[in-house]
Image (tube, rainbow, N blue to C red):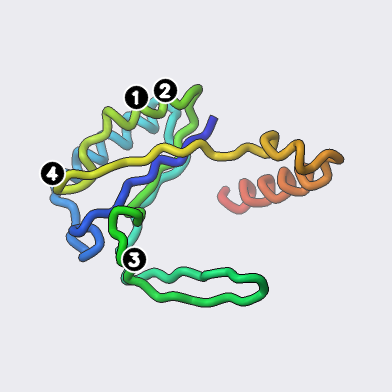
Amino acid sequence: MRFMILVKATKDSETGVMPSEQLMAEMGRYNEELVKAGVLLAGEGLHPSSKGARVRFSGTQRTVIDGPFAETKELIAGFWIFQVKSKEEAIEWVKRCPNPMLEDSEIEIRQVFETEDFAESDPSGELRKKEEELRKVLDSQRR
């Protein structure tokens, strides 16, 4: 099972306060543990929302909204993608994570859909085959 681990933004992360050298070292050790355990598939930190944008959809209309965005507690400052056996294992790994912020913070854990989860919406399996082909192309581009 794959899980996306979402590090929620804080006032500091949204104003561009960078992590301390100590926190960077602690996060590096944590990431090293994840890699050695075969858990980590991907992970990145995100710039503040002031450098981002949103695209709002309404029927055929598209509206671009430039950041920053007001609700800091709803914003994401970084993510990991874990490959684990269960949500409980993902939770255990997250509990071992150093506090990713210099203040109180929160990490959200969300399971990633797998192509099998859409079987009901794709009874012929054609869309799944195309998805698998795209994933093979992506894998070959990464090498």
- Residue kind at label 4, given as amino acid type: Gln
- Residue beneath label 2, please? 88
Q: Is residue 103 above or below residue 120?
A: below
Label 1 SS: helix
Of the image marks 1 and 4, the number of the one nearer the N terminus: 4
Q: Nearer the viewer, residue 99 or 26?
A: 99
Label 2 SS: helix
- Residue beneath label 3, please? 49
Q: Position of residue 21 (x, y in %)?
A: 14, 49
| Circles 1 and 4 in contact, beta carbons < 8 Å | no
Label 4 SS: helix
Label 3 SS: helix
Query: Could you tell me which residue is drawn at 29 percent across and 53 percent down?
Result: 73
Q: Position of residue 45 (x, y in %)?
A: 34, 53
User: Rounded to the nearest whole Å, what is the CA distance between mark 3 and mark 2?
Assistant: 30 Å
Of the image marks 4 and 2, the number of the one nearer the N terminus: 4
Q: Nearer the viewer, residue 21 or 102?
A: 102
Q: Which label lies toward us, 4 or 3?
A: 3
Of the image marks 3 and 1, the number of the one nearer the N terminus: 3
Query: Could you tell me which residue is drawn at 72 percent across and 47 percent down?
Result: 131
- Residue beneath label 4, please? 22
Query: Could you tell me which residue is drawn at 56 percent across and 50 percent down?
Result: 142
Query: Could you tell me which residue is drawn at 86 percent across and 40 percent down?
Result: 124
| Circles 4 and 2 in contact, beta carbons < 8 Å | no
Of the image marks 4 and 3, the number of the one nearer the N terminus: 4
- Residue beneath label 1, please? 92
- Residue kind at label 2, given as amino acid type: Glu
**Label number found at residue 41:** none
